[in-house]
Image (spheres, grey):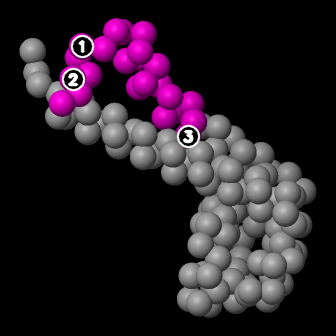
Amino acid sequence: MIDINTWPPSIAIAFGLAPFIIGLSGVAIDTYTARSRDFDLIIASLPNSVWLKMQIPFWGTTRLKSRCYLLTTIAGAMLYPKLSVRLGMMDAEDLRNFPPRLRRRMLIASWLLITAAVWLAIGLALIKLSPTR
């Protein structure tokens, strides 16, 4: 069993801070994209996506919070494009024609957030499973 209590302090601190740094990098990329002109290009690139047409009037596109919500859900749909098309969230043609640089940026941000969440869960499990002194 891995005992986190026996790790050198510098390694333990680095291991504990890493998911926050990774996660905040993903949040920073999403926030930058939501505040930039690229957000309007993302919305314009998905004209046939029914789900997006229903969400925009509900959430709006003026506040940063609503822009980040729309952006992360679009990125989530792009993580599993076949599923999102099958569920009717996105249009297959829209996803095929989506700008590659924006898709790459959104997917990188999503994977950074996923990696941070998994790392944090592993770290918490290691702490819980470590024997107490």
Tell me which label, 1 or 3, sits earlier in the chain. Answer: 1
Q: Is residue 125 among what the camera can see?
A: yes
Residue at the disc numbered 1: 6
Residue at the disc numbered 3: 23
Residue at the disc numbered 2: 3
Amino acid type of the residue tagged 3 in the rendering? Gly
Q: Position of residue 4 (x, y in %)?
A: 26, 22
In the image, what residue occupies the spot 59% across and 90% down?
86
Instruction: Tell me the element at label 1.
Output: helix
Tell which tag, 1 or 3, sits nearer the viewer. Answer: 1
Q: Is residue 63 among what the camera can see?
A: no
Answer few, some or many: residues within 10 Å of disc 1's Cα (few below 14, many 20 plus, some between 14 and 19).
Answer: few
Name which quarter of the figure residue 38 lies in.
Answer: bottom right
Amino acid type of the residue tagged 1 in the rendering? Thr
Give yes or no for contact between labels 2 and 1 (Cβ–Cβ under 8 Å): yes
Tell which tag, 2 or 3, sits nearer the viewer. Answer: 2
Give yes or no for contact between labels 1 and 3 (Cβ–Cβ under 8 Å): no
The chief SS type of the magenta part is: helix
Instruction: Tell me the element at label 2.
Output: loop
**Which residue is the extreme one toward the front?**
1
Amino acid type of the residue tagged 2 in the rendering? Asp
Specify start and end residues of the magenta stretch as a single range.
1-23
Answer few, some or many: residues within 10 Å of disc 2's Cα (few below 14, many 20 plus, some between 14 and 19).
Answer: few
> Camera-side residue: 31 or 61?
31
Tell me which label, 2 or 3, sits earlier in the chain. Answer: 2
> Camera-side residue: 72 or 122?
122
Q: Position of residue 61 (x, y in %)?
A: 76, 66
On screen, residue 89 above or below 67: below
Name which quarter of the figure residue 81 lies in.
Answer: bottom right
Distance of label 2 from label 1 (alpha carbons)? 6 Å
In the image, what residue occupies the spot 66% across and 70% down?
78
